[in-house]
């Protein structure tokens, strides 16, 4: 556990410190154990003192999401406009979102589950600022309004689906059963192998290959396929 938030914070507690400690707690222990009381213990302060900076747990979760979105904005590798063409723009944006997801795998599902600024926004590009950047960038590249919006939907759907699967493999809680269980799956566990060999011998024989972590390669391949699809959307419109 990070020592920076384990030592006493009396006299210098602020909102940024509380959010940083909450992120550390999520990555250490998961969402199911995050409470204001546990956060106070981590910061070695009374839980009530946290409410001067964060009104409650819902506000804390929203603040964590805002922090993750800000990390995307602060990434120097993510452009704010397509200076090198729309494919480079979307490719670098996708990898920027993925970097945030992998840096905070247990916090990243909050990007999908917390209410966005507007109901028609889609995670993970769920802030008005990012959607403005995305749509304006594609329109500047000659996309029609319809093509830009359809591309936003395709792009966010691709990112969310792939990245939730990837952070789930890293122990993230992405459903109520995960939250109730409270334990991260052990990748070494292989229950029912004898039955698997009997009922699904091909799957059993390829078990080693199926368990290989090729997420980075698969992400790049799916991204290239997505960009090709968006090019079809652009030219068709």
Image (cartoon, rainbow, N blue to C red):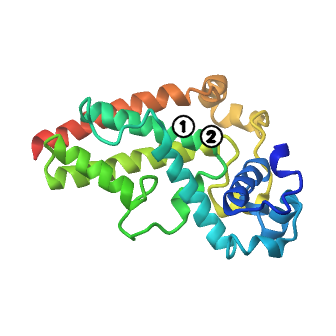
**Which of the two residues, 18 or 94, is positioned nearer the viewer here?**
18
Whether residue 1 can be seen here: no
Q: Label 2: how many residues lie within 10 Å, few (<14), some (14-19) or many (20+)?
A: some
Residue 206 is left or right of residue 136, and the answer is right
Of the 4 image quadrants, the one containing the N terminus is top right
Q: Which mark is drawn over residue 115?
A: none
Q: Are circles 1 and 2 on residues that touch, CB within 8 Å?
A: yes
Q: Residue at x 54, y 58 (%)?
A: 66
Q: Residue at x 30, y 55 (%)?
A: 132
Which residue is at a point 62% across and 55% down the rendered structure image? 174
- Residue 11 shown left or right of residue 174 in the figure: right
The correct choice, above or below, for 95 with respect to 53 in the image is: above
Residue 201: x and y, percent? 64, 29
| Badge 2 element | helix
> Helix, strand or loop at disc 1?
helix
Measured as percent of width and height from the top left, residue 71 is found at 53, 46
**Residue ID at (56%, 58%):** 65
Q: x, y percentage for residue 141?
A: 17, 40
- On screen, residue 100 above or below 112: above
Residue 232: image quadrant is top left
Residue 101, picture quadrant: top right
Which of 171 and 123 lies nearest the eye of the viewer?
123
Q: Residues within 10 Å of mark 1 (few under 14, many from 20)?
A: some
Q: Nearer the viewer, residue 205 or 159?
A: 159
Q: Which residue is mark 1?
A: 99
Q: Quadrant of residue 119?
A: bottom left
- The spot of residue 126 in percent (x, y) is 43, 58
CA–CA distance in space, label 1 to label 2: 6 Å
**Residue 103: image tag:** 2
Can the viewer see residue 106 in this picture? yes
């Amino acid at each position: 556990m990070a020592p920076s938030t384990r030592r006493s914070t009396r006299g210098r507690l602020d909102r940024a410190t509380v959010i940083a400690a909450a992120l550390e707690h999520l990555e250490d222990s998961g969402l199911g154990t995050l409470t204001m009381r546990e956060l106070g213990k981590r910061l070695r302060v009374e839980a009530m003192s946290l409410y001067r900076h964060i009104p409650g747990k819902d506000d804390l979760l929203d603040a964590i999401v805002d922090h993750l979105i800000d990390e995307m904005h602060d990434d120097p590798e993510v452009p704010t406009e397509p200076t090198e063409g729309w494919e480079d723009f979307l490719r670098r944006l996708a990898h920027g979102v993925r970097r945030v997801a992998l840096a905070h795998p247990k916090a990243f599902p909050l990007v999908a589950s917390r209410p966005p600024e507007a109901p028609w926004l889609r995670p993970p590009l769920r802030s008005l600022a990012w959607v403005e950047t995305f749509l304006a960038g594609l329109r500047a590249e000659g996309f029609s309004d319809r093509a830009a919006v359809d591309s936003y939907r395709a792009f966010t759907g691709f990112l969310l689906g792939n990245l939730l699967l990837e952070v789930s493999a890293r122990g993230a809680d992405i459903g109520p059963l995960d939250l109730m269980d409270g334990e991260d799956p052990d990748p070494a566990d292989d229950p029912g192998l004898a039955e698997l060999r009997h009922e699904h011998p091909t799957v059993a024989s390829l078990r080693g290959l199926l368990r290989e972590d090729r997420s980075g390669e698969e992400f790049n391949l799916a991204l290239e396929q997505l960009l090709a699809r968006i090019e079809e959307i652009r030219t068709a419109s």
